[in-house]
Image (tube, rainbow, N blue to C red):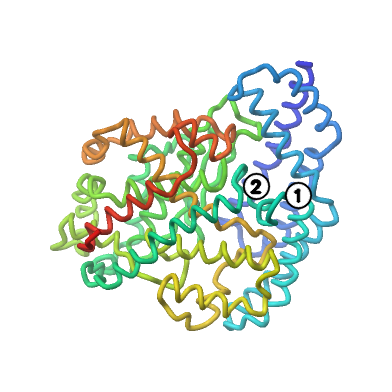
Amino acid sequence: MADALRRLKTILGEVTDIHRAGAVLDWDQETYMPPGGVHNRAEQLSTLSEVAHRRFTTDEVGKLLDEAAATTAKLPFDSDDASLVRVTRRDYDLARKLPPELVAEIAHASASARPHWQKARHEANFALFAPYLEKNVELNKRVAEALGYEKRPYDALLDRTEPGLTTDQLEAIFDELKAAIVPLVADIQRHADAIDDSVLHRGFDPDAQVRYALDTVTKLGYDLERGRQDISTHPFSTAFGPGDVRITTRVSRDFFNECLFGSIHEAGHGMYFQGIGRNLDRTPLWDGASPGVHESQSRLWENLVARSLPFWHHFFPSLRKAFPEPLKGVDVEAFYRSVNKSYPSFIRVEADEVTYNLHILLRFELENDMLEGKLKVADLPEAWNELFKSYVGLDVPNDREGVLQDIHWSFVGFAEFPGYTLGNIIGAQLMEKIRSELTDLDDQMERGEFGALLSWLQEHVYQHGRKFTPNELLERETGRPLTPKPWIAYVRKKYSALYGLKH
Ligand code: ZN
């Protein structure tokens, strides 16, 4: 029986190696590969993912999982081996439920929809993309049917990305968020003049920005012995194992926030990867608990830490030394206010901390309506614009700045958006618990000390990898399941002070 577990680990180790080799090729494609490499690289990546998939979904792996389960049945729930068998079983069942023909059809549909989405977006003409989105909605439905669900088709898709969460639970959380944010956003709008962020656009030397950002993330705890930072169009983080976790950033001379906050965001993901227990290496457990939990770490470091006043009390003097010209006559308080300016905007990826979740709520509702047949693809732009007006308060000028802005609907991947909002909520829920234990956290940050914070996160979140579902992790480490209340309390307090609102 112990042999089954050993054999299973050998196979999972190989599958992990293949995925990581693919990740290196991906990283290279996004950073240094010449444009001519695109075609061959796509072939290499698809070969590797097919080899990994085939190796993982054999009957043998199913049999070994059954046998290993007998060995681990008496072990504690959180033991490495019991967790490995439990989580791998879930992955295996999901992977086996999708017929290979459907997987191939999805890959093909995504590849052919992409250029039409690009063209439609470029010309701000939704009709060019509509037939492809119709196909993708149908494929999302078929995936939901193949995976199975009790109540709503979205449940099947959500359980794949955020295991254990249901659509109804998420809907209740999102309703609570909406009730709190919509009036707050409107209130901030009425006081928009309270913050002037023109300093951020005064021109910051790009090379100096990249140096300053890298220096800052290492001070927070991102380990350069096991990491590096490069430049890419879309910043991302990736991991090839505990000893090699990389981040990328981008830089703009005319907008300060992009490089520093982008780097800290990716370093948050990176520190999560660097903190996963080495005992879980080369297994399916060596990863973040879910996209939502992963995003909680990037947002926690980016917003709850780096957009706080104590953080800037520590860093502003060195920032002013690095950029004396643009920061002439600016004090720490004014700079803190600038990097926290909130304003309604059309594009999700440019949205601030407060308005961001509204962009996600809208996509969540529309995906559900399309999946459940309540909304026809042809009527989508109108539905988008209507919801956008009621949530964000703006009239969408065209489909490029509206329904066509995200790449997500060009591939078959409904239920990916909620992870972004879950990240905000989970980050705040963890932070509330952290502050109850590290009661002098603000003083520590003012002194530039982030070690106790990082250790807390390593011990309570990072080391566990994928052992627990998001709710299992939160109940275990904060004493209660997922709740938006800490995040709502946090933004209300912070933005009431920033904008002089009465609450
Ligand atoms: Zn992220």
Amino acid type of the residue that numbered disc 2 sits on in the rendered structure: Asp
Image check: 296 left or right of 333? right
Q: Is mark 1 within 8 Å of ligand 1?
A: no
- List the residue tagged with mark 2: 159
Counting other residues with Cα less than 10 Å from the Cα at mark 2, is it few (<14), some (14-19), or many (20 or more)?
some
- The x and y percentages for residue 381 are 58, 78
- The x and y percentages for residue 243 are 53, 33
What is the total number of numbered labels drawn onto the structure image?
Answer: 2
The vertical placement of 433 against 105, above or below, is above
Q: Secondary structure at mark 2?
A: helix
Which quadrant holds residue 500? bottom left
Labels 2 and 1: the sequence-earlier one = 1
Q: Quadrant of the C terminus?
A: bottom left
Residue plotted at (70% across, 69% down): 373
Q: Secondary structure at mark 1?
A: helix
Task: Verify CB contact (< 8 Å) between mark 2 and mark 1.
Answer: yes
Residue plotted at (69% across, 64% down): 372
Counting other residues with Cα less than 10 Å from the Cα at mark 1, is it few (<14), some (14-19), or many (20 or more)?
many
Between 60 and 10, the one nearer to me in the picture: 60
The vertical placement of 251 against 157, above or below, is below
Between 485 and 37, the one nearer to me in the picture: 485
Q: Quadrant of the N terminus?
A: top right
- The x and y percentages for residue 52 are 76, 42
Between 124 and 215, the one nearer to me in the picture: 124
Between 468 and 406, the one nearer to me in the picture: 468
Which of the numbered marks, if any, corresponds to residue 17?
A: none
The vertical placement of 311 against 416, above or below, is above
- List the residue tagged with mark 1: 147
